[in-house]
Amino acid sequence: MTRKILKPSILVASVLFLFALQSYLGSEDKLHKVWAVKDCKIVTLAGAPIEKGAVVSRNGLIEAVGANISIPLDAEVLDGTKLSLYPGLIDSLGQSLLKLPEEKFDPLKMYSGEFTDRDKGVMPELKAFDYVSLGKSIIEKYHKSGITGAQVIPQRGMFTGQASFFSLGNADKNKALLLKDNCLGIGFSPANFMVYPNSLMGVVAYLRQAFTDASYFNLNRERWQKEMRGISRPDYTPLLEILTEYTSGKKPVIFLCNNQNDIRRSLNLAADYKLNYLICDLGSEAWRVIPELKNAKARVLCTVSFKVPSTSIHAQLGKDEKEKAEKEIYPKNPAKLAEAGIPFAFSSLGTDDPKSFMEGVQKAIDAGLPREKALEALTATAVSFFGLERALGTIEPGKIANFVLAEGDLLSKEAKIRYVFADGDKFELKEAKAKEGEKPTVDISGKWDLSLPNGLRIITEFSQEEASFSGKMTTPFGAFDFTGGVISGNEISFEMNVSVGGENLDLYFSAIVEGDTMRGTVVQGTMGSAEFSGKRIPG
């Protein structure tokens, strides 16, 4: 059969059509709203595991769970034989989903002395929601690690900004949002050396003054709102307006602690100002202050990079002693908290990508953390810290349908995640396999300039992981993500699919890569093909 050559004008029109319809990209099962997973082991975390049962989800919520439930006639059925079903995992605090604007310090301010609050690291108005970057390939990276929920927060400064919590099933942040501006980050890092506060003592003094001012502002405002007559109204101050939500205890603050001393400072501040708070243990030194944490009934977010703080004695005894501590001592931090009965969840701060985050959790398990405690910290305990326990964290009717299907124990090194459900949408995770005997011989990571017929150019950023890759295409008509690319030797291939009104539009890309160039073919379904070329963009 002779293949019809695709006219450039048709290809361009198709690509334009594709970009105009990005909202249709995502889970291939967006049209399916009722799912039933049958004959799987169900780790509910709300009771004993169900050795062979079914879970039904409808319109994004879990409808039924059990060993002998009826499968609805309108359900799409997924066979869960040989699979175990778990609640979707939670990254309780991270920033890898954020794309914050670059902060450049103007050296001329050193002469004028006209420093802004941002120069001082005072940014409570900075909202993670405004800068979060979701996309199909980004979400897939989280799904590959079993993560279906994540909270993100800016990390720089004293008042670092406000966090938001997302369910990772939709690239539209408005649809993915669970909680907005729900926590305020507080750090102990001094500002630029020319800007007050430029010392740790100054930071603590500044925080205390800010908390005091916010409490006083709130009292005066409430008094004026109640009486008004004969009372001068307080001046509106944006910083204090935001802080009153947190000093009043309505919302929690998260202390970002670099070491054990920061933890003690946080406990003192929280007690003095009666704050609703969590401790984010960036330095993995919570084990050093367990009595104080227990006495304060503190809740801890454990990071898993396990880097020895510069203030630790292990960092001051030389490189060998430092590396030994990072391998043998600091990974035991979560296990010691669990043994002491201190509630904790896990934070990806310091690891910055889902794979490294879960590898850090695995290190904690290898260092003595019971697997069941690690699972609780990644699910039920995590959501309880932020008031989401009625929506997530366990497999129960009425909760959001966020769950993971895996071969083997989800937290074991050998586990293979096959499916992820997020907000009731199914995502299938396929292993990218090169042809037998043909491992990747090229690295396509980075930005490429792809030239298509009729002068259409697409800037594409590839992210490669062994034999698989994902990417993001940027065109004059918009940007979107794709996943599922495969590399075999120096050959690459990936595809895109759009379904609109019952009609499917498919584009298949394949190319040979040689150094910093590629040349290949793009096929539009049964319409034919056209050639394209690409050059790596330096940098």
Image (tube, helix red, strand yellow):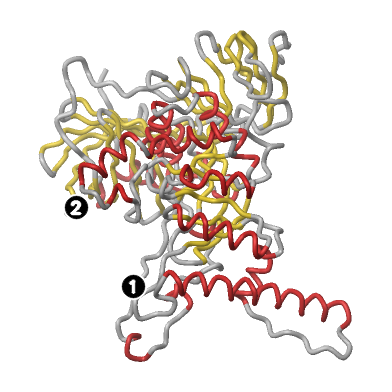
Q: CA distance from mark 2 to mark 1?
A: 25 Å
Classify 10 Å Cα crowding around label 1: few (below 14), some (14-19), many (20 and above): few
Is there any visible trace of residue 169 in the rendered image? no
Q: Nearer the viewer, residue 42 or 463?
A: 42
Q: Name the quadrant containing residue 78.
A: top right
Q: Nearer the viewer, residue 28 or 438?
A: 438
Q: Is residue 3 left or right of residue 102?
A: left
Q: Which mark is residue 480?
A: none
Is there any visible trace of residue 148 in the rendered image? yes
Q: Nearer the viewer, residue 444 or 208?
A: 208
Q: Which residue is mark 2?
A: 537
Residue 244: percent from the left, percent from the top?
68, 68
As helix, strand or loop, the secondary structure at mark 2 comes to loop
Residue at the image position 36 percent from the left and 74 percent from the top: 192
Residue at the image position 70 percent from the left and 78 percent from the top: 217
Q: Give whichever of discs 2 and 1 has the lower sequence position.
A: 1
Q: Which residue is mark 1?
A: 104
Q: Indicate the amino acid at tag 1.
A: Lys
Seen in the picture, residue 511 relative to 352 is either above or below; the reply is: above
Classify 10 Å Cα crowding around label 2: few (below 14), some (14-19), many (20 and above): some
In the picture, the quarter occupied by the N terminus is top left
Marks 2 & 1, CB-CB < 8 Å contact: no
Count how many numbered circles sit on residues in the image.
2
Seen in the picture, residue 172 relative to 33 is either above or below; the reply is: below
As helix, strand or loop, the secondary structure at mark 1 comes to loop
Residue 45: percent from the left, percent from the top?
63, 24
Q: Indicate the amino acid at tag 2.
A: Ile
Residue at the image position 49 percent from the left and 63 percent from the top: 160
